[in-house]
């Protein structure tokens, strides 16, 4: 019992993120990268930006899904080990944004992979992104994390 | 029977396995905090008081992640290289005096300096194998970079380690540590400085960070690892860092020996050891933060054309100093 | 028409005589020369021989119904001369000009992809911006393209060997960078063939961020298009908005009030500062210098604050509109802005010292990724990439827009052509931008900040150029008198610079590839649109 709560505590205190841009205009991406910089410093929460999908727990995706990126996005999601979460950042990742309906655009991220948290904005401020991640961790704390294996 | 219990306690708890693990995690936290402060940030804060439990949380989380073994890998090596590497690094700790004596009492022998350095090389080789067996191009490049860099710094490391051995007239680490009435870092400062630089290369920290060049080769040799094996791979890296720092402390900073107040030498020796180790860690982490990463060919030039001749020269200078201090009679 | 343009026109008339069908000036002071398709190469050859620094700025295609019009915008002597021709739709083909000027390579490939024009003699027929599995005979930018017929299946993005020429028996390892790679914030694929650690061949594959913006712009009103083109690239969003609005204002024949011109200058320079600082920090990350990255981005935050005070949003400004700017600058904000900029200026001297003296930084950037001046001109590169190789090119000086004709500043060039030079150009430009903003704030004219413009844009065409942080940004807009534009063409600076990637990577070290790429400041969302 205490082992399970130890595991849950560890998972909530050490969410490693992977950032993937599947067709964004860069505005959301630079706000995500700004999270690591001194003003926002998400390493305080134990969040580290990992380079490889195999090391990450949370996938931060930005941008619409273009036709060419759709398969990549799916493969990256499959390469991540369980338990894993997806945060769609920005209006484009949530629903397609201003590009909805264009010929090379499939839509928001949830057309390809399941999304846990939507953070709207164009781009959302870094504070909003942190808020989204904190909400993710809170909801993960309440849900049964252990069952996800 | 009581001797056996003490043996078990020393190996498993203090100053053995548990102490090494605990101290590894604390040093990891120290490094992350220093790096954060140097970069004008705060670093881990909310996991335990001042974030000190962060490495522990990372480790536990990694242990419980899904275990993925890619189909194409060479299974046996892929599965066991991380844990072997980790075990060998921890094993090397048994030969370093931490609380005034080796972990296994009376286990030091003439030449255990060479033995420990060889163990470090073997463990590094297992890190290489872990990348090589992943059959991922990024892992392969990272693994070959580990080996290339290793070939460059290993010889200067051995030569520089011989300098204090010469001054102490002994090739056993505990004997070298005990025989330093005066820390060798002050007596032969050039060897200490060069040793720290070579240590940067051995620990794969900036400017010799090439095997971990995230932006070029993704995760390097760690790319395909997940879950438990990744946890042990990262732990192996951390143990290597404090092992390297501990060797530097033993050889150049008179190990755990220092003034003892009001009796209880075990406590004071451990305290001095920890303080000196932290000092070396702070120095290496500081150097990491202020340098960029060199390219692999620049690293090779630095190793073969600069470090190697300088280390030979420093050995010669040390021999000269040694003979001057203790002239050979007859 | 300036005297330079008159001179060039006389030269063309001498050489081509009656082959010139028509000389038009649909836009005030800009020359369009209409010729037959067969005469195109001769006309262009005259222009390129007259000035060895001339280059192709863009190649625009427009669907005219029965034929496709091709416009070759040639940049020469600081201005743009356009040579236009038409090819029939059923048999859309024309001779390629890549042998005359290698920099036209990607422009032709893009028109081939989107309009279906075949360029005879072009070195490659591979796709550029559209996915590989896009139907072969469907060209999105043609007016009669039926897009709904494309199934929504997932693209098969397995790394196929078709994207590189066969290696003919040489033992070269193929390394693919991207689309997901920590070095690239954005997804693009670079296939490298390496021999040990030396790169032998590079093949870029772009189009991963292609969102079909040019087509979408035709289905939205002009005002909606401003918000669309801003999101081509979040980093240089004000430049896109400015260029689009300038072009539409040129079609309408209106000029914005002086206060608006100065305010536009302020937001454009703020864009430049934050973009250059972003890049310098990113360069630090690429060469393993994390501390530089953290410091630079820490110092960049006040700039984002200033943009937020001015426009209400940190990144995408939505500040510029047709006829002026959308909101005014309050007087009490000016001292706050100037105080922040003074702090920034002091920090810049620290970074200059760092770049001049740090040994490991110089080891990674000096003599790395060298682009000679000859190559820079032949490949028609723009922006700091060109200025770092000694080419004097800056739209703010060549054809001043906004308030740049009234504000004194220096153009920064370095001659070394290596990564270090390109980074130093950007560092120095930050200082210049701070001076420009200070001057603009000190001399801000009073008066209205926008003029009311009619909803319907009269029929006409125009092009506009803006010096974005990455180089010359080129827009062409054609209006047919309705509420929707007929054609919006965007040629972004990184699109013009991609060929230089190939040139500087080949022959160098694999380890230098991320460092050289980042010094070119690629922005692939701009490139793909």
Image (cartoon, helix red, strand yellow):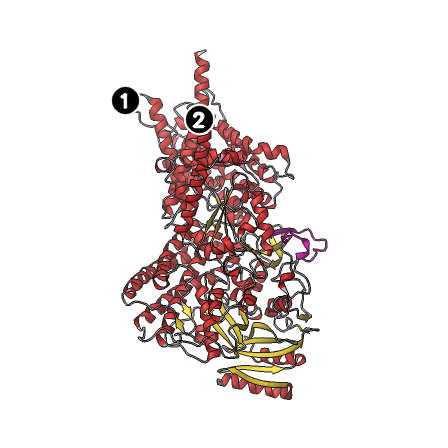
> Where is residue C394 shown, x and y percent of the image?
46, 72
Q: Are marks 2 and 1 in contact (CB under 8 Å)?
A: no
Q: Is residue B17 above or below residue C338?
A: above
CA separation in Å, label 2 and label 1: 27 Å
Which of these two is toward me, B196 or B42? B42
The residue positioned 56% from the left and 44% from the top of the image is: B142
Residue holding disc 1? B262
Rendered residue at 50%/33% (across/down): A146
**Which quadrant does the C terminus of chain C fall into?**
bottom right
Residue B49: say if magenta: no
Residue B287 picture quarter: top left
Instruction: Read off the chain for label 2.
Output: B
Q: Which residue is mark 2?
A: B18
Question: Can residue B159 be spotted in the picture?
Answer: yes
Locate residue C13 relative to residue B96 in the image: left or right.
right
- In this view, which residue lies farthest toward the right? C169
Number of callouts in the render?
A: 2
């Amino acid at each position: 019992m205490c082992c399970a709560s130890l595991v849950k505590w560890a998972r909530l205190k050490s969410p490693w993120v992977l950032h993937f841009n599947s067709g964004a205009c860069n505005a959301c991406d630079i706000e995500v990268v700004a999270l690591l910089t001194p003003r926002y410093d998400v390493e305080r929460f134990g969040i580290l930006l990992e380079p490889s999908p195999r090391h990450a727990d949370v996938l931060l995706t930005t941008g619409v899904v273009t036709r060419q990126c759709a398969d990549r996005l799916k493969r990256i999601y499959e390469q991540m080990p369980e338990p894993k979460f997806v945060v769609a950042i920005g209006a484009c990742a949530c629903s397609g944004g201003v590009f909805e309906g264009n010929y090379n655009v499939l839509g928001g991220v949830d057309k390809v992979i399941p999304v846990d948290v939507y953070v709207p904005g164009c781009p959302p401020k870094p504070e909003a992104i942190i808020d989204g991640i904190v909400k993710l961790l809170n909801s993960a704390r309440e849900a049964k994390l252990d069952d996800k294996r | 029977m009581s001797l056996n219990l003490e043996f078990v306690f020393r190996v498993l708890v203090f100053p053995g396995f548990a102490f090494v693990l605990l101290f590894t995690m604390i040093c990891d936290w120290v490094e992350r905090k220093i790096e954060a402060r140097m970069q004008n940030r705060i670093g881990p804060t909310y996991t335990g008081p001042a974030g000190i439990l962060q490495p522990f949380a990372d480790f536990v989380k990694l242990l419980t992640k899904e275990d993925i073994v890619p189909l194409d890998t060479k299974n046996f090596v892929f599965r066991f290289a991380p844990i072997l590497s980790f075990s060998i690094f921890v094993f090397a700790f048994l030969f370093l005096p931490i609380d005034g004596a080796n972990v296994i009492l009376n286990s030091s022998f003439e030449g255990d300096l060479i033995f420990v350095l060889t163990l470090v090389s073997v463990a590094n080789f297992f890190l290489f194998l872990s990348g090589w067996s992943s059959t991922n191009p990024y892992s392969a490049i990272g693994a070959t970079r580990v080996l290339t860099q290793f070939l460059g710094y290993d010889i200067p490391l051995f030569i520089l380690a011989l300098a204090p051995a010469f001054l102490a007239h002994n090739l056993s680490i505990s004997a070298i540590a005990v025989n330093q009435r005066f820390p060798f870092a002050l007596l032969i400062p050039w060897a200490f400085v060069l040793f720290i630089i070579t240590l940067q290369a051995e620990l794969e920290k900036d400017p010799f960070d090439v095997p971990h060049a995230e932006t070029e080769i993704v995760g390097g040799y760690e790319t395909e690892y997940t879950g438990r094996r990744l946890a042990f791979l990262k732990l192996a890296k951390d143990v290597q860092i404090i092992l390297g720092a501990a060797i530097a402390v033993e050889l150049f900073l008179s190990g755990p020996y220092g003034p003892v107040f009001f009796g209880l030498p075990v406590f004071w020796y451990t305290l001095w050891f920890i303080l000196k180790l932290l000092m070396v860690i702070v120095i290496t982490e500081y150097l990491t933060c202020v340098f960029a990463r060199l390219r692999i060919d620049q690293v090779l030039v630095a190793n073969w054309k600069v470090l190697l001749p300088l280390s030979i020269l420093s050995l010669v200078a040390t021999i000269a100093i040694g003979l001057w201090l203790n002239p050979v009679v007859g | 028409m300036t005297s330079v343009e008159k001179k060039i026109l006389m030269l063309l008339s001498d050489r081509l005589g009656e082959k010139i069908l028509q000389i038009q000036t649909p836009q005030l002071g800009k020359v369009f020369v209409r010729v037959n398709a067969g005469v195109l190469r001769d006309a262009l050859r005259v222009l390129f021989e007259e000035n060895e620094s001339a280059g192709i700025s863009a190649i625009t295609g427009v669907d005219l119904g029965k034929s496709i019009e091709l416009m070759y915008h040639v940049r020469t002597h600081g201005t743009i001369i356009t040579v236009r021709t038409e090819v029939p739709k059923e048999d859309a083909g024309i001779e390629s000009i890549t042998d005359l000027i290698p920099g036209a390579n990607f422009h032709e490939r893009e028109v081939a992809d989107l309009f279906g024009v075949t360029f005879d003699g072009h070195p490659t027929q591979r796709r550029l911006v559209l996915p590989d599995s896009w139907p072969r005979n469907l060209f999105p930018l043609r007016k009669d393209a039926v897009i709904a017929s494309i199934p929504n299946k997932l693209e098969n993005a397995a790394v196929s060997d078709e994207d590189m020429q066969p290696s003919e028996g040489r033992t070269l390892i193929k390394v693919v960078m991207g689309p997901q790679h920590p070095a690239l914030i954005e997804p693009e694929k670079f296939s490298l063939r390496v021999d040990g650690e030396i790169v032998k061949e590079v093949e870029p594959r772009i189009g991963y961020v292609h969102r079909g913006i040019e087509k979408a712009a035709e289905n939205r009103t002009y005002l909606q298009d401003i918000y669309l083109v801003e999101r081509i690239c979040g980093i240089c969003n004000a430049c896109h908005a400015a260029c689009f609005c300038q072009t539409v204002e040129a079609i309408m024949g209106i000029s914005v009030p002086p206060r608006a011109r100065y305010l536009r200058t302020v937001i454009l320079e703020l864009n430049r500062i934050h973009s250059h600082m972003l890049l310098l920090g990113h360069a630090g990350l690429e060469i393993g210098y994390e501390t530089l990255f953290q410091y630079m981005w820490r110092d960049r935050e006040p700039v984002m604050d200033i943009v937020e005070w001015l426009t209400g949003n940190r990144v995408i400004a939505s500040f510029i509109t047709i006829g002026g700017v959308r909101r005014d600058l309050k007087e009490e904000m000016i001292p706050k802005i100037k105080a922040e900029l003074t702090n920034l200026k002091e920090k810049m001297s620290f970074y200059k010292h760092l770049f001049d003296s740090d040994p490991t930084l110089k080891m990674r950037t000096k003599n790395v990724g060298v682009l000679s001046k000859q190559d820079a001109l032949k490949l028609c590169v723009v922006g700091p990439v060109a200025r770092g190789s000694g080419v004097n090119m800056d739209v703010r000086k060549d054809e001043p827009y906004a308030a740049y004709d009234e504000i004194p500043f220096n153009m920064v060039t370095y001659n070394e052509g290596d990564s270090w030079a390109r980074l130093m150009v950007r560092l120095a430009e930050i200082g210049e931008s701070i001076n420009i903003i200070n001057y603009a704030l000190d001399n801000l004219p009073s008066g209205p900040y926008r003029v009311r413009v009619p909803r319907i844009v009269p029929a006409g065409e125009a092009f506009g150029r803006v010096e974005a942080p990455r180089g010359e940004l080129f827009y062409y807009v054609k209006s047919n008198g309705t509420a929707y534009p007929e054609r919006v063409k965007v040629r972004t600076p990184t699109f013009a610079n991609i060929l230089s990637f190939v040139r500087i990577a080949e022959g160098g070290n694999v380890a230098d590839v991320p460092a050289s790429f980042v010094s070119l400041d690629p922005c692939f969302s701009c490139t793909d649109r």
